[in-house]
Amino acid sequence: MDERIRKPLVALLIPILLIPAVVILFIAGKVMLTGGGEAVPESKALESLAVPAVASVVRSQAPGAVAGNPSMGSDSYGGLFIGWGGNIVEVRSNRSLLDEPDPALSSFAPTAEGLVLTVRKDRLGYVANGAVQDRVTLPSDKMRVERIASDKVLLFGPVVSTKTWAVYMVAKGGAYSKLFTFPGEIGAVAGADDGFFFAASGGIYRAEFGKRVVPVLYFPSRPGIRSLAYDSGRRALFLSLGDAVYVLLEGRLVRLLDKVSGTLCLRHDGLFILSEARQELLKVDNIFN
């Protein structure tokens, strides 16, 4: 087939084929969570959990600062970064990366090389010399960037022309390539073994690089999933919903914390929660026995 005809044809067929597939995934995911109306089977998940201890690490210095698109990330050098009020702060040193707050800064991700990638309006850039350096034009001004592995960074956001959402892989230098599109809004992503999890349309899905997307959970009656974090060693997926933090462990969804939620970041030294409601960064220890 002529290449000029094949590419538009493929672009037209992908949304047509994907939408019925996603409907099937929704149904399958609902069955996986509810067991077709039966009780969720007992497991040893509860026995694996201890009594979590929550402590405050740092508080916002300005009222309402956290409301400015709260975000968080961790690099390979042990640095923990929080973003609120238009700035990015390294927690351990309490150092702001920007000389002046930038209200247009909406998302960031520290890389393994120590570079901090940024999304500012519809531009992908990085932090240098105390300011955001815009570089690459993005398909939307509502994109978000997330590091999901030591060598992998994703972009995700809406595709305005098709009213879908897309996930992109970012290469060194800022070039990005589309992995797939999805008909529902993607609210959060987190790295996983050989792929990543993403939350969308009342459910959680797992994407395997170059292979498939499969449903994990479906709960339309719950508030929206705000953030995800994955512990690959224990195969535990943490979820931040509107009013609580849950953990999916051994096929069972368990409420971990009540009246606490926010942006999640899992590190070797604990689970961190950037809480918009509390205006502070929290650390959770003693999660597992």
Image (cartoon, rainbow, N blue to C red):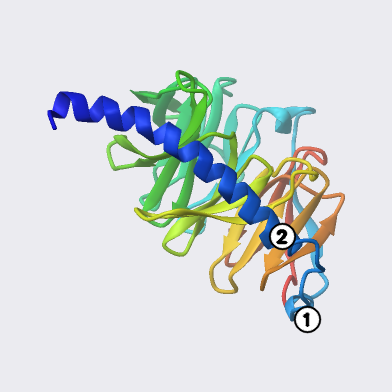
| Amino acid beneath label 1 | Glu
* Residues packed near mark 1 inside 10 Å, few (<14), some (14 to 19) or many (20 plus): few
What residue appears at the point 43 percent right and 32 percent down from the top-left corner?
15
Q: Which of 95 and 45 is in front in this view?
A: 45
Quarter of the rendering containing residue 5: top left
Amino acid at dot 2: Leu
Residue at which label 1 appears: 47
Residue 128 shows in the view: no
Q: Could you say which is closer to the camera, residue 98 or residue 9?
A: 9
Marking on residue 3: none
Q: Is residue 50 left or right of residue 70?
A: right
In the displayed structure image, the side of residue 105 where residue 30 appears, left or right: right
- For marks 2 and 1, give the CA distance: 20 Å
Pointers 2 and 1 in contact (C-beta within 8 Å): no
Residue 12 position, x and y percent, is 35, 27
Q: In which quarter of the image is the N terminus?
A: top left
Would you place residue 180 above or below residue 52 in this image?
A: above
Identify whether 30 is placed above or below 116. Answer: below
- Residue 235's spot in the image, x, y percent? 58, 70
Residue position marked by numbered label 2 in the rendering: 33
Image quarter hosting the C terminus: bottom right
Q: Is residue 183 left or right of residue 117?
A: right
Q: Which of 249 and 64 is in front in this view?
A: 249
Element under disc 1? helix
Q: Which of marks 2 and 1 is in front?
A: 2
- N-term-proximal mark, 2 vs 1: 2
